């Protein structure tokens, strides 16, 4: 590569746990800093730049002002990567959208002050509900290895393509005991792999924090639910945690 | 070849010795002898509620009385991920093969898994020989046993014959504190050099009895010789839509199958982009993108078609190619399928009951 | 009809997957997405037969099967045409003359050119299908006296996607070739020839003797069904139809499973098939 | 232009978590406006969790903050357990404390090494230190990596722990893992020493600024409090139980911030490492006491910049305590506990000391175990007001140095609090 690509990191409404995963690369982040030119990363450095080859966007959008900031970043970026489930689907922040309305939401948190203008908010949106996204790195939080892999693919000029198979693949390779054997309903058969099946490996059902595969077999899931006396609504509610709608093909890869 | 016996204590201390040996080994075959490596020793151990093949830290961890392991031993010969080549990115002159497995011993391989290894051996040696697989096989000793614990999905007695003896180097039968040791190959004999083997006082009938101690609940519902033709005639059977509709395309059935060996090959690079490797990883014909071409055609886009392909591979394609049923009846696919549909017995039964 | 195979790559003790080095000695753009590549091996000729393919790779990016489009030759050079669709093909397009790539092969079954001696040849190629077909066409033209009539039909989506335009023009002119061409649509480009899918060219051939003629058909998956119907209408029997199929492929040597259709491995048993040998396979066409 | 006309506008302070702005206006040497603003987008967690099952609350509220996700998880679990009347085993408690120490170490070392040291050396980022201070960076990354791995081994993941569940852990570490962890913890003590010495050598670069305030933290008999205890401040004689936290935090909304402010006996209070240290320093372990002495922290300190130093001290404490907990766990029979919880209606409060200070979660459940009301009070919330009041004292004192220096020190002050701004707005 002739000159190092200019890379920037931005965060919107989120817990910043995904950029922490980047920081958690430890020594590798120092290598990364040599491979690319990190021109903006507010949480770890002071500095700004006019244009970027790759902009990594974390978090979701909940206000008009942030929407404008995002559009401005998009205009100045060659490639835009949404990383973390907040950016990819709206993530946990979309739980807010399940409530009756924004006024109630504001009142719940700010009580009598809810009407103050600086507390304004609208229903949470994913990044691609506002600007075009070139690549997605799903997960809550993102998997460090996958983040690095995407960076490497982009540096090589390749097209990073996420796994399009269910979490069960990751589970089997680790020889985990399947949670269904213990009558625990796991979203793994519909969820997109790539996390290493961390949740089932730690004894907890997958809650599809990386969204679903491109073409989840929801009919098969319905049959299983019946067998375990669950309703479709109950499962959909589980998918709500990370704003995943198994009925709607997200097309996000 | 030879039938001897060894006490369980002697056997355990022998494999522990092998495991920790540091002196040059007289190994099986030419490829190992002269290596100053220790024997990596793999055995069946407990993992939570299940059994798995894992490297032994001590012979005491061995659990030879087990129903089935989650993954079959193929993971040692065709690892879930292995490096085929190393290179410097974008420098084609730099390609170099990576292939120097050390000696391993696998202890406690059930006879159906041995039959499956025999099938894999054929697949990787015939036609273009795959050195990565074959070197690992050559540098391994397989110590087999007959199942001693019931597994509700197993149906191996209806599909395997004696072919497992073509893969095993040694077969063990546990009897009254002893192992009856049946040495089948020169490799096996070399491996056992120095073990406290004693004259055998068991009869072949005893071994036969032990080998057939566990009865399967399930069996293939028609003579296996008839399966290929039966499948040939039923390409458009309603079973494929029926099972396809229930299948998650999760590939559990393939990953756990001892006779599935499809793989993917891809390149990985260091973050510095200064070094890279071409790796081979397990893949599966049950996954949606398996047959997707670069220009976007998917030749097996339907779940039913993928489900059918897997069953045909076992019951017809491999059978016709190698003369042995392509499924060894371990029952792992049936046991690991979340949808509860993957087992060949279930599929064939459904097909027979629902004549289209 | 027996399979014809070239001398496959020398047996390698270390790894079946270890490529040799080939140097790019010539490259030119044919369409915005397709480029012509000429490679040279270090110290051997590729030794392929028409219709075979090789696995070509860029270290760090990956490997892809690509047909060899030049006819068999004793020289160390061979030609390919590569369409940019993804990572590997993209990286190959980025190569400059003098750069090197990895090569494994040749692989697969070839067009049975020897067995076809003394017959009429009907080449039907759609789009990038002309690339593998070209090696057979050039071979037949080099051995013109061995064959009777040579008919070439070529079709592609639009004029901008025509490959080997110089060769097409020559074939058009040659007296000893029957040549017809069509585009699915003109898409606004100046075009005076036929417009319509490739099967619309078949009626232009008039009477073809189906017993003495072999059809060699290569094109995108959707093309086969209609071309075969057309050939049946012309009384071609299935064993006189020869196809080259494309599938996803990783190893090229019949192990990885990706190209399998029913019990056939397209990489080893094909990519060239006699239609009568695969017509019963539900996953073939 | 008059010499003492100053206009400072820092739109998003860098090297802090979340979005905060600084505004200063001065005319003729008189400060007219100095403000710490928090424009962070609120996410409305208290509204999000309403309608969700008790088992999901920790999973959801963990996402309030990536850096202290373990703290949120634990406060949430404690609140749920208080509401449902669930007790936990010794093993679970020890594992939780271990997790919390891992997070404290991880968060503190990240803050000191990556965010504060660049200030002390006056560079823009840790990246510029890769060549000049390689040894220091390697020590920092080594400690940080181990802290993360601890969280990984105990919690199943470095961020947003998986195994910590209501009433239990869903998977337990292997003894082998614990033993190895302990020996590696011992191993990093010299690295921590090196980091402490570097900070000591640079400590003169922290300004000598003081403002006495009310220091709020947990406290308990016998042990420097992190996981358990009641509330204490330097202004009260008797501790206050955590379920009466509302009497202390007194949250209110101001126009300059989307995060709520709070106060108790004075106009503001401070929480975090320095508050904990000021209230509980007598309970530090031996090595951490030594570290405090070495770093010149003796008794109560009113200099907010000393929060950084108190963090270094707590790093040592966290390592020592972690080793103790590992010993305790190694002596126990580790057995997975069953997941059997009976839901009932009820409400409860959970509090823990997280890296940035005292954290409260409060939930109310209906009889199906579905959340009907929630409140989370985040430590940075509680500090915003104190930052504002520090600003008001500091700006006139530092104005002499000129606008660039003033700006530098105000930013440095913000960083000293290690604020977690998105968390405070949640
Ligand atoms: C026998 C044979 C001969 C061939 N001859 C030629 C030839 O002469 N010339 C030629 O140009 N080509 C030829 N091909 C095709 C060529 O091999 C492929 O185009 C090539 O392998 C694509 O590789 P790539 O890395 O560039 O594309 P990839 O990056 O692998 O993929 C390309 C496209 O496929 C899609 N895709 C792939 N995988 C996925 C996924 N998991 N999910 C979603 N979408 C996906 C995407 O749309 C992507 O843009 C031949 C193929 C065969 C089998
Ligand atoms: S635990 Fe979940 S992800 Fe794992 S195999 Fe079972 S269903 Fe699939
Ligand atoms: S395990 Fe079952 S659900 Fe999964 S791919 Fe196989 S048949 Fe389908
Ligand atoms: S198909 Fe199923 S039963 Fe047969 S060998 Fe494979 S996993 Fe075992």
Image (cartoon, grey):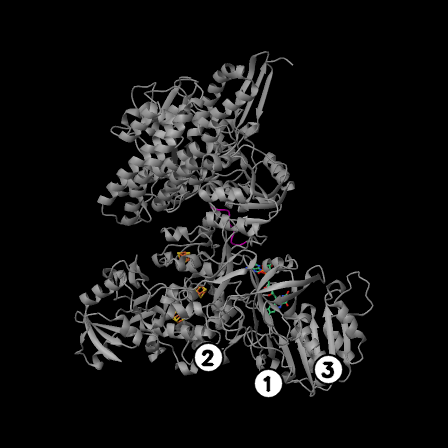
Residue C162, can we see it? yes
Q: Are the residues under badges 1 and 2 in a single subunit?
A: no
Name the quadrant containing residue D190. top left
Q: Position of residue D121 (x, y in %)?
A: 48, 28
Q: Distance between the residues labelled 1 and 2?
A: 21 Å
Q: Does the magenta stretch include residue A64?
A: no
Q: Which chain carries label 3?
A: C
Numbered label attached to residue B321: 2
Q: Are the residues under badges 1 and 3 in a single subunit?
A: yes
Q: Are the residues under badges 2 and 3 in a single subunit?
A: no
Q: Mark 3 points at which residue?
A: C144
In the displayed structure, does residue D340 sit left or right of residue D202?
Answer: left
Q: Residue at x 71, y 59 (%)?
A: C32
Residue D271, can we see it? no
Which residues fall within the magenta stretch?
A: A241-247
In the displayed structure, does residue A43 sit left or right of residue C189?
Answer: left
Q: Mark 2 lies on which chain?
A: B
Q: Distance between the residues labelled 2 and 3?
A: 40 Å
The number of numbered badges drawn on the structure is: 3
Q: Where is residue B147 in the image (x, y as percent from the top left)?
A: 28, 71
Disc 2 beta carbon < 8 A from ligand 4? no
Q: In this view, does C169 lie above or below D117?
A: below
């Amino acid at each position: 590569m002739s000159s190092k690509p200019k890379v920037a990191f931005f965060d919107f409404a989120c817990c910043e746990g995904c950029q922490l995963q980047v920081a958690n690369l430890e020594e590798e982040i120092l290598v990364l800093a040599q491979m690319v030119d990190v021109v903006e990363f507010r949480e770890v450095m002071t500095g700004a730049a006019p244009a970027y080859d790759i902009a990594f966007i974390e978090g979701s959008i909940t206000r008009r002002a942030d929407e404008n900031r995002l559009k401005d970043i998009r205009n100045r970026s060659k490639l835009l990567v949404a990383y973390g489930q907040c950016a990819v689907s709206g993530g946990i922040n979309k739980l807010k959208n399940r409530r009756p309305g924004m006024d109630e939401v504001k009142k719940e948190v700010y009580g009598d002050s809810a009407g103050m203008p600086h507390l304004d908010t609208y229903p949470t949106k994913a990044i691609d509900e506002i600007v075009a996204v070139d690549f997605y790195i799903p997960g809550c939080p993102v998997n460090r290895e996958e983040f690095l892999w995407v960076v490497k693919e982009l540096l090589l000029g390749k097209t990073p393509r996420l796994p399009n198979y269910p979490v069960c693949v990751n589970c089997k390779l680790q020889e985990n005991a399947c949670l269904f054997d213990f009558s625990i309903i796991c979203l793994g058969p519909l969820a997109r792999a790539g996390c290493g099946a961390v949740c089932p490996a730690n004894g907890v059902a997958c809650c599809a924090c990386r969204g679903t595969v491109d073409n989840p077999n929801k009919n098969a899931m319905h049959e299983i639910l019946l067998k375990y006396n669950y309703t479709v609504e109950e499962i959909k509610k589980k998918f709500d945690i990370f704003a995943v709608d198994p009925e709607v093909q997200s097309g996000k890869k | 070849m030879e039938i001897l016996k060894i006490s369980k204590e002697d056997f355990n201390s022998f494999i522990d010795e092998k495991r920790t040996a540091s002196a040059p080994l007289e190994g099986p075959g030419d490829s190992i002898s002269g290596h100053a490596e220790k024997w990596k020793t793999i055995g069946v151990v407990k993992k939570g509620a299940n059994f798995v093949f894992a490297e032994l830290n001590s012979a005491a961890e061995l659990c030879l009385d087990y129903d089935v392991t989650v993954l079959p031993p193929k993971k040692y010969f065709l690892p879930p991920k292995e490096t085929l080549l190393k290179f410097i990115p974008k420098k084609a002159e730099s390609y170099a093969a990576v292939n120097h497995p050390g000696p391993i011993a696998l202890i406690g391989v059930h006879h159906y898994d041995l039959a499956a290894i025999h099938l894999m051996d054929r697949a990787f040696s015939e036609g273009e020989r795959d050195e990565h697989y074959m070197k690992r096989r050559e540098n391994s000793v397989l110590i087999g046993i007959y199942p001693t614990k019931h597994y509700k999905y197993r149906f191996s007695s209806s599909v395997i014959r004696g072919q497992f003896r073509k893969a095993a180097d040694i077969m063990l039968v546990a009897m009254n504190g002893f192992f009856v040791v049946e040495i089948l190959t020169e490799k096996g004999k070399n491996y056992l050099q120095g073990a406290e083997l004693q004259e055998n006082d068991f009869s072949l009938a005893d071994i036969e009895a032990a080998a057939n101690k566990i009865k399967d609940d399930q069996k293939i519902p028609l003579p296996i010789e008839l399966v290929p033709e039966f499948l040939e005639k039923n390409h458009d059977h309603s079973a494929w839509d029926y099972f396809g509709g229930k299948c998650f395309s999760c590939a559990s059935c393939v990953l756990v199958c001892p006779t599935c060996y499809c793989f993917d090959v891809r390149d990985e690079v260091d973050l510095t982009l200064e070094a890279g490797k071409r790796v081979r990883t397990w893949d599966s014909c049950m996954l949606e993108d398996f047959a997707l071409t670069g220009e976007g055609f998917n030749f097996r886009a339907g779940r039913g078609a993928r489900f059918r392909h897997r069953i045909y591979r076992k019951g017809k394609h491999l059978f016709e190619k190698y003369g042995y049923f392509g499924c060894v009846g371990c029952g792992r696919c049936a046991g690991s399928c979340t949808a509860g549909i993957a087992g060949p017995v279930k599929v064939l039964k459904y097909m027979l009951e629902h004549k289209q | 009809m027996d399979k014809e195979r070239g001398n496959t790559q020398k047996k390698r003790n270390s790894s079946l997957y270890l490529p040799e080095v080939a140097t790019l000695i010539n490259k030119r753009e044919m369409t915005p997405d397709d480029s012509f590549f000429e490679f040279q091996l270090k110290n051997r000729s590729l030794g392929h037969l028409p219709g075979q393919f090789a696995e070509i790779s860029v270290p760090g990016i990956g490997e892809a099967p690509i047909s060899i489009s030049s006819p068999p030759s004793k020289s160390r050079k061979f030609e390919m045409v590569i369409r940019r669709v993804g990572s590997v093909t993209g990286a190959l397009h980025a190569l400059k003359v003098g750069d090197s790539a990895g090569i494994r092969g040749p692989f697969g079954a070839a067009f049975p050119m020897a067995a076809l001696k003394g017959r009429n040849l009907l080449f039907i190629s759609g789009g990038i299908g002309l690339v593998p077909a070209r090696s057979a066409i050039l071979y037949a033209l080099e051995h013109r006296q061995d064959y009777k009539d040579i008919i070439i039909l070529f079709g592609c989506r639009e004029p901008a996607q025509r490959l080997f335009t110089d060769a097409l023009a020559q074939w058009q002119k040659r007296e000893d070739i029957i040549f017809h061409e069509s585009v699915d649509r003109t898409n606004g480009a100046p075009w005076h020839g036929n417009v319509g899918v490739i099967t619309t060219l078949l009626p232009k051939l008039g009477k073809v003797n189906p017993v003495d003629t072999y059809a060699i058909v290569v094109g995108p998956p959707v093309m086969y069904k209609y071309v075969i119907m057309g050939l049946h209408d012309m009384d071609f029997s299935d064993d006189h139809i020869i196809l080259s199929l494309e599938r996803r492929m990783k190893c090229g040597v019949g192990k990885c499973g990706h190209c399998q259709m029913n019990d056939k491995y397209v990489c080893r048993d094909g990519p060239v098939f006699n239609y009568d040998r695969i017509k019963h396979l539900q996953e073939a066409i | 232009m008059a010499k003492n006309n100053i206009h400072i506008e820092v739109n998003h302070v860098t090297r802090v978590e979340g979005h905060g702005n600084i505004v200063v206006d001065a005319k003729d040497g008189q400060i007219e406006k100095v403000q710490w603003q928090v424009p962070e987008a609120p996410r409305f967690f208290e509204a999000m969790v309403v309608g969700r099952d008790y088992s999901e609350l920790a999973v959801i509220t963990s996402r309030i903050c990536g850096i202290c996700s373990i703290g949120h998880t634990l406060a949430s679990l404690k609140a749920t357990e208080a509401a449902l009347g669930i007790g936990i085993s010794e093993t679970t408690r020890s594992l939780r404390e271990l997790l919390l120490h891992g997070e404290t170490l991880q968060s503190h070392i990240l803050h000191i090494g990556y965010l504060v040291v660049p200030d002390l050396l006056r560079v823009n980022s840790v990246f510029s230190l890769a060549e000049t201070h390689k040894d220091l960076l390697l020590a920092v990354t080594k400690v940080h990596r181990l802290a993360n791995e601890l969280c990984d081994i105990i919690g199943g993941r470095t961020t947003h722990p998986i195994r910590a569940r209501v009433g239990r852990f869903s998977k337990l570490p292997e003894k082998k893992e614990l033993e190895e962890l302990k020996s590696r913890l011992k191993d990093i003590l010299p690295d921590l020493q090196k980091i402490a010495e570097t900070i000591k050598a640079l400590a003169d670069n922290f300004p000598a600024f003081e403002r006495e305030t009310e220091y709020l933290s947990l406290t308990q008999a016998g042990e420097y409090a992190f996981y358990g205890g009641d509330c204490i401040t330097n202004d009260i004689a008797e501790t206050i139980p955590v379920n009466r936290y509302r009497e202390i935090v007194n949250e209110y909304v101001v126009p300059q911030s989307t995060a709520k402010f709070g106060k108790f006996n004075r106009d503001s209070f401070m929480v975090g490492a320095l508050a904990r240290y000021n209230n509980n320093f007598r309970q530090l372990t031996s090595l951490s006491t030594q570290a405090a002495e070495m770093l010149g922290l003796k008794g109560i300190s009113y200099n907010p910049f000393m929060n950084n130093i108190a963090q270094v001290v707590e790093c040592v404490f966290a390592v020592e305590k972690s080793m103790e907990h590992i010993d305790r766990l190694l002596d126990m029979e580790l057995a997975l506990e069953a997941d059997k919880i009976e839901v009932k209606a009820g409400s409860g409060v959970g509090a823990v000391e997280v890296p940035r200070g005292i954290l409260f979660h409060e939930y109310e459940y209906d009889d199906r175990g579905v959340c009907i009301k929630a409140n989370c009070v985040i430590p940075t919330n509680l500090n915003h007001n104190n930052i504002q009041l520090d600003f008001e004292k500091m700006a006139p004192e530092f104005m002499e140095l000129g606008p660039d220096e003033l700006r530098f020190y105000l930013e440095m002050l913000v960083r000293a609090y290690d604020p977690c701004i998105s968390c405070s707005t949640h």
